Every structure is written in C-alpha cells, then in structure tokens.
Image (cartoon, rainbow, N blue to C red):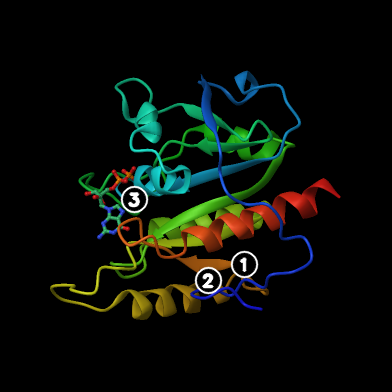
Amino acid sequence: MILPGSNIVVGPYAGHSQIKEVEFVKSSGRAKDCPKDDRPEFAILGRSNVGKSSLINALVRKKELALTSKKPGKTQLINHFLVNKSWYIVDLPGYGFAKAPDVTRMDWSSFTKGYFLNRESLVGVLLLIDASVPPQKIDLDCANWLGRNNIPLTFVFTKCDKMKVAKGRRPDENIKSFQQLIRENYPHHPPWIMTSSVTGLGRDELLLHMSQLRNYWDQ
Ligand code: GDP
C-alpha cells in the first residue's frame, strides 16, 4: 500500500507510531554536546517560516513544544525532544531568512554540518519544503548537500492546504516542479509526503513512515 499524498510504501516494518509522551531534553550548541545516546533520532530541518514549529507541534499534538527553539538565544541550537522514551525528534536551526538580501546562499553554520556528518544515531532528516511557493534554490542546495553526503532524507511538503495562492501555482504543481529538479541529482527519488499543520493532512502517515524507518534502523 502506498500512503496517500506520498510515494511511501507501507511495508513489514510499520509499527506503533503514535506519540504518547514527549519531553524536552537538551539544547546543544555543538554537535559533540548532543545527548550521548544510541536511541534513534530524526532531524527536522527547513527554511525559516517553512512551518517547522507548526509541524512539530502537530506531530506531538502540543501547542508550544517547539517554541523552545524559538526563544531568544535558542534558535541557533540543536534541540532534542525525547518521544515515548525511545526516540528523538531533533529541531535544528532554520536556514535562509526570507528577508535577507541573498536568500539563495546556504548560510549554514559548520556545527549543523558537523551534526549531520557525525551523528551516528541519525535515522534520517525530514527536510521541510513549503509547497505554497515555487521551488527555492536554497532548499535544492540543502537537499543536494545532504544527498552528496549520503544522509537519508524525506521531503516533507508543508502548507499543502494553501490552495488560494495570489499569483503562481497550487501546492501540487509546486511539488511536481520541485521533484523534477530533484531528479537531476538523485537517481532514486527520496521519500516525499504532503502535509498541512492546519488540516492535519499527512500527520498520521508521516508518523507511520517514521516508525518504519526506526524499526528498519533497529534491525
Ligand atoms: P517556522 O519558522 O518554520 O517554525 O514556521 P512556523 O511554524 O512558525 O510557521 C510559519 C507561518 O506559516 C505561520 O504564520 C504559520 O501559521 C504558517 N503555517 C505553518 N504551517 C502551515 C500550514 O500547514 N498551513 C498554512 N496555511 N499555514 C501554515
């Protein structure tokens, strides 16, 4: 079975996926300060304003959990949240501020790169892409950097409920364009899924996908 609004096949590793409890564990300024732990983790990453806090809160069904990372001084930190005492959601600093003059430049601190390259318990990255806007170079650069470094990722398209776009195209059209551009660099298309934190679209499917990846990783 393929999960609706995605290219993800549900296989034998799908298991318990709902989130019962979640606790904030730690903010780390350097990759080597992250919790010393071999429990599996997912890093959540995206451009500022992509809807990262909203998605994390929708996944865990709490209003303010991810806001920890939005408090002054916390935005540039790696924030670990422990879920069901068995795996982590990791909220990473957003990249590319929409109002910065050069939004196409990947302005990524070396510690974020260090995290990706050295975190052995990283199951995968959820790379959030705003489906209400056309493909952005900075997101493609990020996806290509992760691909070049063999870091597994899932494209999580956000704001898929936004059907009224003033000018331009609908989310499904933007997603198609994005995928065409990704094909140039990825011989096998990574998993992708459509979500909305407003309607709840894709929430349960994304959790199921994460449970499959965790269970597969555990084998
Ligand atoms: P962050 O900076 O990536 O953490 O983004 P936020 O979660 O703070 O969201 C940025 C803006 O996008 C806010 O105004 C949200 O209300 C809006 N937003 C986030 N997710 C969605 C969504 O799924 N649908 C719509 N329509 N708006 C969203």
* Cα gap from disc 1 to disc 3, whole angstroms: 21 Å
- The picture places residue 87, in percent across and down from the top left corner, at 66, 37
Query: Does the beta carbon at disc 3 come under 8 Å from ligand 1?
Result: yes
Q: Nearer the viewer, mark 3 or mark 2?
A: 3
Disc 2, SS: helix
- Is there a contact, CB below 8 Å, between mark 1 and mark 2? yes
> Which residue is disc 3 drawn over?
51
* Cα gap from disc 3 to disc 2, whole angstroms: 21 Å
* Circle 3 Cα neighbour tier, 10 Å, few/some/many (<14 / 14–19 / ≥20): some
Disc 1, SS: loop
- Precedes in sequence: disc 1 or disc 3: 3
Camera-nearest residue between 48 and 219: 219
In the image, residue 34 sits, relative to residue 88, either above or below, namely above
Query: What amino acid is labelled 3 in the image?
Result: Gly
Image quadrant in which the N terminus is located = bottom right
Find residue 96 and report its image quarter.
Answer: top left
Query: What amino acid is labelled 1 in the image?
Result: Pro
**Residue 182's disc number:** 2
